[in-house]
Image: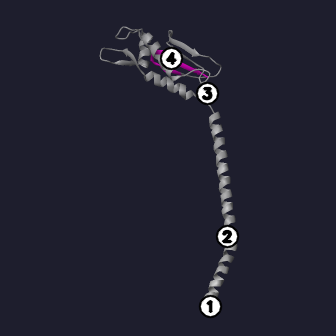
Amino acid sequence: MGENIMNKKETPAFTSRINIKICPESKRSQEEMLGFALIMVVVAVVLLIFLGFSLSSSKKESVESYEVESFIQSFLQYTSSCEENFELNYLSVQKLILACDKGETCVDGRETCEVLNTTLKEITENSWKIGEEFPVKGYELQIVSSEDSLISFKEGNITGNSKGAVQVLPNSVEVQFTAYY
């Protein structure tokens, strides 16, 4: 029984020595880990702020040439409101251009060149927003036959910087579109 008392007395002293030696080192490790975590959070926040500023300041300044080429290709496939015959067969813009070159009329009596002009103005106004707050400052569309100009219109400011494309159709008809930025 005497030994149990001594062991009981030694145990608290032994644990207090352990607490003195282990706990301060443990607290120091925890503080270092907490400090490292705070540094990582600060670095991550700084990087996010930098990334946010760099992305917001990089506005699109110009028009790419593939955009102009794609625009021409897409509006040539657009279906117009001009009927070719009484079977509800509406002309695509490409076929409408060729019909305009030949001087044909729609089934409802409208001139194909009038329908073409109206359709192309509507498409370009909806597709190319122009102005100081937009990358595109103006545009120009011309459809030229070997003999004469079928369609020609401009909108906005004609600047020194531009991207353009030309599409040649049958019967030497050229579709020219230029976007100014």
Looking at the image, is mark 1 or mark 2 nearer the viewer? Answer: 1
Q: Is residue 102 left or right of residue 10?
A: left
x and y percentages locating residue 30 in the rendered image:
66, 63
Residue for point 37% across, 11% down: 106
Which residue has dot 2 on it?
A: 23
x and y percentages locating residue 152 in the rendered image:
53, 12
Query: The magenta stretch spans which residues?
Result: 166-181
Q: CA distance from mark 3 to mark 1?
A: 91 Å
Which residue has dot 3 on it?
A: 62
**Disc number for residue 3:** 1
- The answer to whether any part of residue 101 appears in the image is no
Query: Contact, CB < 8 Å: mark 3 with mark 1?
Result: no
The magenta stretch spans residue 134: no
Q: Is residue 142 left or right of residue 37?
A: left
- Given the image, on which type of amino acid does mark 1 rest? Glu
Q: CA distance from mark 2 to mark 4?
A: 85 Å
Looking at the image, is mark 4 or mark 1 nearer the viewer? Answer: 1
Q: CA distance from mark 1 to mark 2?
A: 29 Å
Query: Contact, CB < 8 Å: mark 4 with mark 1?
Result: no
**Disc number for residue 174:** 4
Crowd class of label 2 (few under 14; some 14 to 19; many from 20; radius 10 Å) = few
Give the mark, 3 or 4, whose residue is nearer the N terminus: 3
Q: Is residue 159 left or right of residue 72?
A: right
Q: CA distance from mark 3 to mark 4?
A: 25 Å
